[in-house]
Image: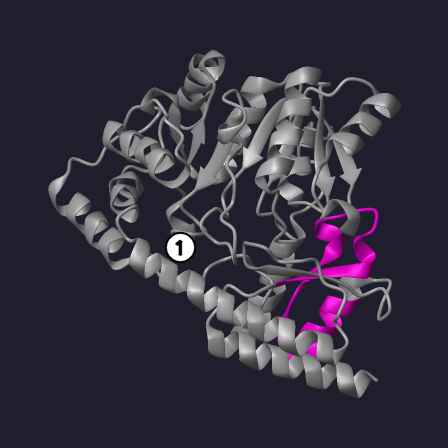
C-alpha cells in the first residue's frame, strides 16, 4: 500500500531556483554563465561583519539565543528605525528571524487562519503566494500594471473585496521584486489608511530598503503602527547566505510569534546575529555597493531599449528590471532557456512572478559584478539583433 504524501508540498516551484540549478549545471559542465537570474548581491558581506563573525566564533559561547534574538541586535535594529525613518521603535517589538523567509512564515502563521484571503500584487515575489498556499490561506492576486506602477492600490483592494469577499491581509513590497517600483509617501499613506478602515492587516516587505535610485523608500510604520514589517540582512547588507532577518510586530502578535519561533526555529543563527550588529556601522561600504548597482542599472537602461527590450517597469529601487517581451515571445520559460543555451546569460521567466501574464515577461537582476552585467548586456543585444 502506498504511503500518504501530504498536500502542502503541492505548490508551484520557485522557478528562479530551477533556473539557477540549470545555470549551475551548465557552469559545472565547463560552459560560461552570466548570472542575471538570481537576486543576490555579487558583493561580500562588509569587512566589519566578517570580522565580527570571526570574533564571535573565537570568543563567544555560540549556542541558542532567545527566540527573538540577541538583545543587542534587537536594540540596534530599533535604533536603525529612528535614524533612517524618524520612527521611534521599542526593541521589544523586534523579532530576529532566520532570514526574511522565516519571518514571512512566522508572520503569516500568527496573523492569519486557514481560509483567510490575503491580497498581493501580480507581478510579485512568488514565495508569497506559495507560502500562503502551503499554509491553507488564499492568495488573492491583484493584477497591477503600469497605471498602478505594479503596486497594490486601494482601488484594486476594493475591487477584490467586492468580487471575492473580505480580505484579512495585504502584502506590500516597496521596492518590489520583480519590478523595482516603490510606493511614495502619499501612496503608502493612502494604502495603509484604506486598510485600517477596512480591517486589512498590512504586511510590508521592506527587504530592499537602502537600495533606491532617488527618493528613499518609505516604511509602512511611518503610517501604520500595527503593520507587520519584514526585513532582511540579505540585500542592502549583502548577507544572503547568512540567513538573518527581522520582523517588527504589533503588540498583539508578539507572544504568538514568539511561541511559533520557539517551536519552529528555536532561534536564528547565533554567529550571524553577532555579525549583524556590526552591519549597521558599514554604511560607507554598503553605499558603494548601491552605487555599483546604480551603474549597472544605467548601463542596462541604456543598452537594452536600443536592442529591443524597451518595455520596462520603472526601477525605482532594488536591483531588477522587469521587461515586457510579448513582441518577442509568448513562452517566457522557453525564451529564457534558449537565451541561456545560446548566449550563456541566465534570466528569470516572468511566470515566476505572474502566473496569468508572465509568459510575456522576464526579469533581469543587475546585482552582480559590473563587468559581468556589461558582458551580459552585450551578448543579449547581439543575440536580439541576430534574431532580427
Left or right relative to 317: residue 351: right
Q: Let me know if residue 112 is in the magenta part.
A: no
171 over 307 or under it: above or below: above
Which span of residues is magenta-colored?
A: 335-364
Q: Which residue is drawn at 86% across and 22% down?
A: 162
Left or right relative to 302: residue 233: left
- Residue 128 x %, y %: 64, 37
Say which residue label 1 marks: 238
Q: In which quarter of the image is residue 169?
A: top right
Query: Element at badge 1?
Result: loop
212 over 247 or under it: above or below: below
223 over 254 or under it: above or below: below
Q: Residue at x 70, y 58 (%)?
A: 313
- Residue 333 x %, y %: 76, 62
- For the N terminus, which image quadrant? top right
Left or right relative to 352: residue 23: left
Q: Residues within 10 Å of mark 1 (few under 14, many from 20)?
A: many
19 over 208 or under it: above or below: below
Residue 227 seen in render: yes
Closer to the camera in the image, 234 or 1: 234
Amino acid at each position: 500500500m502506498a504511503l500518504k504524501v501530504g498536500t502542502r508540498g503541492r505548490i508551484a516551484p520557485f522557478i528562479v531556483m530551477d533556473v539557477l540549478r540549470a545555470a549551475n549545471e551548465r557552469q559545472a559542465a565547463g560552459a560560461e554563465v552570466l548570472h542575471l537570474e538570481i537576486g543576490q548581491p555579487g558583493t561580500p558581506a562588509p569587512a566589519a561583519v566578517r570580522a565580527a563573525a570571526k570574533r564571535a566564533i573565537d570568543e563567544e559561547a555560540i549556542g541558542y539565543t532567545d527566540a527573538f534574538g540577541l538583545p543587542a541586535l534587537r536594540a540596534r535594529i530599533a535604533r536603525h528605525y529612528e535614524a533612517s525613518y524618524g520612527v521611534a521603535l521599542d526593541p521589544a517589538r523586534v523579532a530576529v528571524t532566520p532570514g526574511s523567509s522565516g519571518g514571512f512564515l512566522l508572520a503569516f502563521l500568527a496573523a492569519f487562519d486557514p481560509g483567510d484571503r490575503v491580497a498581493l500584487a501580480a507581478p510579485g515575489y512568488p514565495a508569497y503566494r506559495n507560502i500562503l498556499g502551503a499554509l491553507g490561506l488564499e492568495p488573492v492576486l491583484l493584477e497591477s500594471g503600469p497605471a498602478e506602477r505594479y503596486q497594490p492600490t486601494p482601488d484594486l483592494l476594493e475591487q477584490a473585496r467586492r468580487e471575492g469577499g473580505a480580505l484579512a491581509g495585504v502584502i506590500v513590497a516597496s521596492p518590489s521584486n520583480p519590478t523595482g517600483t516603490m510606493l511614495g509617501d502619499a501612496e503608502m499613506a493612502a494604502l495603509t489608511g484604506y486598510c485600517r478602515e477596512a480591517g486589512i492587516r498590512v504586511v510590508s516587505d521592506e527587504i530592499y530598503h537602502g537600495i533606491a535610485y532617488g527618493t528613499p523608500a518609505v516604511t509602512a510604520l511611518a503610517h501604520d503602527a500595527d503593520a507587520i514589517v519584514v526585513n532582511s540582512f540579505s540585500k542592502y547588507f549583502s548577507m544572503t547566505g547568512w540567513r538573518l532577518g527581522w520582523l517588527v510586530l504589533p503588540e498583539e502578535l508578539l507572544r504568538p510569534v514568539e511561541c511559533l519561533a520557539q517551536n519552529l526555529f528555536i532561534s536564528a543563527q547565533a554567529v550571524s546575529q553577532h555579525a549583524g550588529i556590526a552591519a549597521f556601522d558599514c554604511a560607507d561600504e554598503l553605499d558603494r555597493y548601491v552605487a555599483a548597482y546604480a551603474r549597472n542599472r544605467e548601463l542596462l537602461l541604456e543598452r537594452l531599449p536600443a536592442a529591443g527590450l524597451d518595455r520596462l517597469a520603472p526601477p525605482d529601487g532594488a536591483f531588477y528590471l522587469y521587461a515586457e517581451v510579448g513582441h518577442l515571445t509568448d513562452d517566457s520559460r522557453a525564451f529564457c532557456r534558449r537565451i541561456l543555451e545560446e548566449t550563456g546569460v541566465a534570466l528569470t521567466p516572468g511566470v515566476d512572478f505572474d502566473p496569468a501574464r508572465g509568459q510575456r515577461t522576464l526579469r533581469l537582476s543587475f546585482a552582480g559584478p559590473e563587468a559581468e552585467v556589461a558582458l551580459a548586456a552585450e551578448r543579449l543585444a547581439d543575440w536580439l539583433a541576430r534574431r532580427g
